[in-house]
Image (cartoon, rainbow, N blue to C red):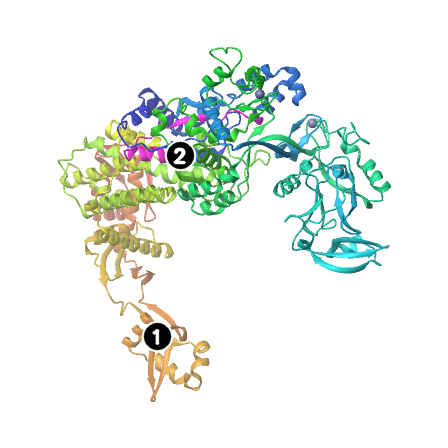
Amino acid sequence: MEKETMQQREQRIRLFWTASNIFEKSIKNRQESTPFVFYEGPPTANGLPHVGHALGRTVKDVVARYKTMQGFLVERKAGWDTHGLPVELGVEKQLGISGKQEIESYGIGQFVEKCKESVFTYEKIWRAFTEELGYWVDLDSPYLTLSNEYIESVWNILSKVHQDKLLYKGHRVSPYCPSCQTSLSSHEVAQGYKDVKDLSATVKFKRTDCNEFFLGWTTTPWTLPANVALAMHSDLTYVKAEQNGETYIVAKSLVSKILDSEAKIISEHKGIEFEGVAYHPPFNYVKIEKGHIVVMADYVTETSGTGIVHIAPAYGEDDYRTVTQNDLSFVNVVNQQGRYTEAVSDLAGQFVKDCDVEIIKLLANSNLLFHKEKNEHSYPYCWRCDSPLLYYANDSWFIKMSSLKTKLLENNATVTWYPEHIKEGRFGNFLENVVDWNISRNRYWGTPLNVWICTSCGHEEAPESIEKLKSLAMKSLPENLELHKPYIDEVIFSCPVCQDEMKRTSEVIDVWFDSGSMPFAQHHYPFELEAFKKQFPADVVIEGIDQTRGFFYSLLAVSALYTGRAPYKNVLSLGHVLDEHGQKMSKSKGNALDPLELMHDYGADALRWALLVDSSPWNPKRFSTKIVQEAKSKFLDTLENTFSFYHLYASIDGYKFNSTLPGKQTKMDEWMLSRLHSTIDKVTTFMDDYQFTQSSREIAKLIDDVSNWYIRRSRQRFWASGFSEDKRAAFNTLHEVLSTVCKLLAPFTPFIAEHIYMQLHDESVHLQDYPKPNKVVINDSLEQEMKDVVKIVELGRSIRNAESLKVKQPLAEMVICSNGHFDAYQSIIQDELNVKKIHWTENLAGLADVSLKLNFKTAGAVFGKHVNDLKKYVENISLNEKETLISEGKLEVQLSGQSFKLDKTHVLTETHVKDGYTLAKEGTLTVLLCTQLTRELIDEGYIRDFIRCIQDNRKKFKYPIEQYIDLHILCTSECQELIVKFIKLIKASVLVQDIVFVSTFDSQHVIKYELDKNSLEFTMNLK
Ligand SMILES: [Zn+2]
Ligand SMILES: [Zn+2]
């Protein structure tokens, strides 16, 4: 049978999970257990998944599977974010229309239907991605932000916000296309910058209390008719200066740029001295109640202009904030088409961007223009219609989050953040500076804002349920009422105050309010109570760091508004996934990795493992195909080979695990089981603290120990004929290790864990409990000893490498110098390093002597004229003093009645190793290997090479490993002598029964070999 590929295996396991309802069972099994609550942040299904999503989904899955196996009930409801501008823009593109007017002439009803259809364009790809990754989440009954139940819950929340008087109408200044009559998002604005020449003006604002002028500067003269204030910086230095008989106030550092060289400085002032000073506005088209005074603002700089900024609240975000903060009047003289209103009588109906010249002329006529100039700068244009954009204040609804700041900070204080610094840093700072939440959008596809306003008396109603909506409606509503626009706009209430008509405000809400409402709306709370009660608050929320101001904030904000409580206990904020050079991945740069492609090439387990083990998920992660490839070749393949080894010999021996027959354990078994249980201990401790990288690295170390040490050292036990107690113990140990490793790995690499566990137990690993460490079998000193043994072997190998001595070449002797006792491991070391004899010592005298010499460079300066005496002293130093100097690093020396303090830096050391030996050293371990070869050793080396050749050919011919063979050999008499000399070794090493020396061959399969430069031919025959 052809070997199954990784992809086929993962697919087979997915099908098994579906057919046997393993995911459902894993939850059903824990029905009576304590819930561990997990919230799924809703992705939008109208974009494709990227590697960042793979990281998020992997971590979510690891946590959920781990907690399930730990005995918790972990329900996992999927969700989809379905509303919003990207969906609308996609549909506009699909229909070949653009902008609000075209949408309205196409028909809002039809447009909304198209949006609804398009939401799930990529749902299939997302489902495939989710399933292929092995992310267990309930995709069959997800929450959908577009469903009536979901919207009803959101309305219930908004109704409470309205009732608490936290919902108010204000203005929102944003980039606006007066032609399309729509606001643009920042990424839309970024698409349309052009370099243009515009007029800027320096304007005279006359003080009302004296004959002095503030000089204000603006690049948008058309906003001057709506001037409300001037802003100065409280700490900047300003001057009063006289020029041509008039007195001007400007920033000191800008005087030379603004005024003539003859201008005379009269006095210096701090900005704060002008706070509240009143002035005459340049135009008197509109009367304002509060304004035309100087206010302080931190964003005012002296890098350009005059250090004094003209403020028109409707046409700039800073301006709007300044006016709101200072409680000044709001004025708007521009209509939604970007034209002056009737108020600006001279220019009414004209497009404001075309009026800069007119405005400057009007200023000049009233002698208020100080200076004008043409500037080239980049200015945003509409990417749809090429009209210049305006920063423009539209009516908007806000939630007064600023009044909940203390509550938000208190709630955040109860949350544990991973990584910890986000709590007080990125997130805490954001909460410290929290602003009111602009929740309305002048769009079509979203949750409609449930506020109805009386057309006569202004009374507002915010129905908290569909039932309430029906009771307020003038006409009876259909049973299956569609809550979206435009249908909902047709619902008219009768005003309970004046009985006139009430109409819904036209906006839809910010999609972030949708997703922030998910703890409640996913369970249709408060209209259904049961599910919600067990699922609030969340034990954990896991998303990318870009969700700090997104999902993480909106959850906290909505819950603070609705319940006053934090909606989560732990937040895991994952870093961005970058390319291998640390650059952001992007489609346009061509460095974006496709998670689906990676899974097709290396399997989901490899992708998951690579994302976890390579680097901590909290930091930006450099990622590449190579990391995934290595996760497969270095980790998964090693595990697979380990299992194959077990599987092969277990089936040859007909071994079945039986816990009542433990066999006779060796030190190696004890060590392996100790390593297993100390690893379980570490992994669970790390996992309980969400330290995925540390956990997975511990498992990787364990697998390495199993494969490269335990099995390597135990092969003979599995190969031995018959079924001894020793063999049974080896099988039992490997069986326990593999079974437990599958359970340890199940949350991380669910496919291979299932694949192996099924073959060992014929049950799904995902329905098992997570292993608990058996502290009784953990033996720290044994583990430390074995670590030292491995180190000794590595040192021995390093000498072999350095001296180019093949492992097959036996060596006469090894000397090991250490404090510990490793007698029990002697045969392991001997076998690993192929040495005949091991000699243990605590002292290397006679084998490796250290001689000392005074270092004139360092000692000369310290000891001056005594240096030559010290040189002699050091050359003849006693053994004891030498040891003290080497081990303690210093030595006090008495010389002709004087005392000298020698330290390590004053001497040069040289190690003389006994002839024929080579030394290697690490920490407290020193190893000497005798590298001299005798004839006997060389001959044995030839034979061991020959044995390897026979072994390779056995494999090549696929001879069953437990079957004996006969060898027929044609060779010289010297070779024959050599072979006969080592016949026992050959027979024992490669299961040879008879060796026959022949003079000719009749067989076809003659193998040619060269033994000590003599050619040799042989054939192998199965017995
Ligand atoms: Zn436009
Ligand atoms: Zn009314």
Query: Is residue 972 rendered to the left or right of residue 514?
Result: left
Q: Is residue 299 left or right of residue 561?
A: right
Which SS class for mark 2?
helix
Residue 409 appears in the picture as rendered: yes
Residue 236 falls in which quadrant of the image?
Answer: bottom right
Can you give x and y, in whole percent of width and height, for residue 535 in the image?
Answer: 36, 30
Q: Residue at x 40, y 76 (%)?
A: 906
**Residue at image mark 1:** 890
Q: Which quadrant of the picture is home to ligand 1?
A: top right
Amino acid identity at mark 2: Lys
Residue 74, image x and y in percent? 33, 30
Q: In x, y percent, where is residue 109?
A: 58, 15
Secondary element type, mark 1: strand
Residue at the bottom extreme, as displayed:
897
Circle 2 crowding by C-alpha within 10 Å: few under 14, some 14–19, many from 20? many
What residue is shown with label 2? 60
Q: Which residues are magenta?
A: 63-85
| Residue 70 forms part of the magenta stretch | yes
Q: Amino acid at mark 1?
A: Lys
